[in-house]
Image (cartoon, helix red, strand yellow):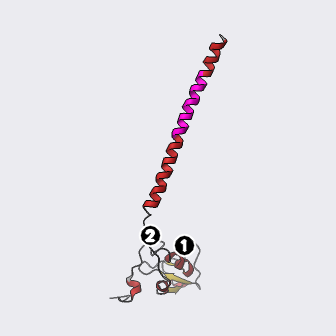
Amino acid sequence: MLFAVFLALFLPCVGMSVVFVVYMCFFCHAATTTRQQQSSNNHQEPMKGINEKGLSSAQLDKLPKVPGQELVLGNDCAVCLDVIDKEQVARIVPGCNHGFHIECADTWLSKHPVCPICRSKLETELFDGTTESNPC
C-alpha cells in the first residue's frame, strides 16, 4: 500500500518534469534560431539609407545660412530638439526650407544626405555649380 501511494505521487511529478524539460529545450532552440536569423539578416541586407554617404564639408559650406529670426517654418531644431534663437545662425535645407542649428545640420548631413524632418534628398545639382539655383 505504501508503494502504491509513492507511485501515485511520484509518477505524475516525473511526467510533468519531463514535459517541462522538453518544453524548455524547444523554447531555447526557437530563441537561438530567431537570434541567428535576425543576426544574419542584419549582415546580409543593410537597412535602407544606411549605405548612403553624407555630404562633404565643401558641400555643407554651399548650403544657405540665415539668422534664426528669418526661419519661416518654425524655430525648433529637429536634430537636438532645442529652440533656435533669433540671433543664432541657422542652416537651411534647400528645397524644403527646414532650418536647424548649423552644428546639428552639419553633423546630420555629413552622415545622411537627406533632410532630418521630411527626408527629402539633397540633389547633387546643388553642389556641382552647373545649374542655376533659380532657373526661372
Q: Is 21 one of the magenta-colored residues?
A: yes
Amino acid type, residue under disc 1 in the picture: Val
Q: Is residue 32 above or below residue 120?
A: above
Q: Is residue 95 magenta?
A: no
Q: Position of residue 51 (x, y in %)?
A: 44, 70
Going by the image, does 127 lie left or right of 23? left
Quarter location, residue 16? top right
Describe the element under mark 2 as helix, strand or loop: loop
- Is 2 situated above or below 125? above
Q: Which residues are magenta?
A: 11-26
104 left or right of 37 in image: right
Indicate the quadrant containing the N terminus: top left, top right, bottom left or bottom right: top right
- What amino acid is labelled 2 in the image? Asn
Q: Where residue 51 is drawn, which disc sits there?
A: 2
Q: Which residue is at a point 53% across and 79% down the rendered structure image?
A: 106
* Residue 72 visible in the displayed image: yes
Quadrant in which the C terminus appears: bottom left
Name the image quarter holding residue 11. Answer: top right
The residues tagged by marks 2 and 1 sit, at their Cα atoms, a distance apart of 20 Å
Magenta stretch mostly in which secondary structure? helix
**Disc on the earlier residue, 2 or 1:** 2
Q: Residue furthest right?
A: 2
Front-lying residue, 46 or 86: 46
Select label 2 or label 1 by which is in front.
Answer: 2
The image's mark for residue 79 is 1
Residue shown at the point (49%, 52%) measured from the top left: 36
Q: Position of residue 52 (x, y in %)?
A: 44, 72
Which residue occupies the extreme left position in the image? 136
Alpha-carbon neighbours of circle 2 within 10 Å: few (<14), some, or many (≥20)? few
Q: Nearer the viewer, residue 31 or 94?
A: 31
Q: Position of residue 40 (x, y in %)?
A: 46, 56
Label 1: few (<14), some (14–19) or many (≥20) C-alpha neighbours in 10 Å: some
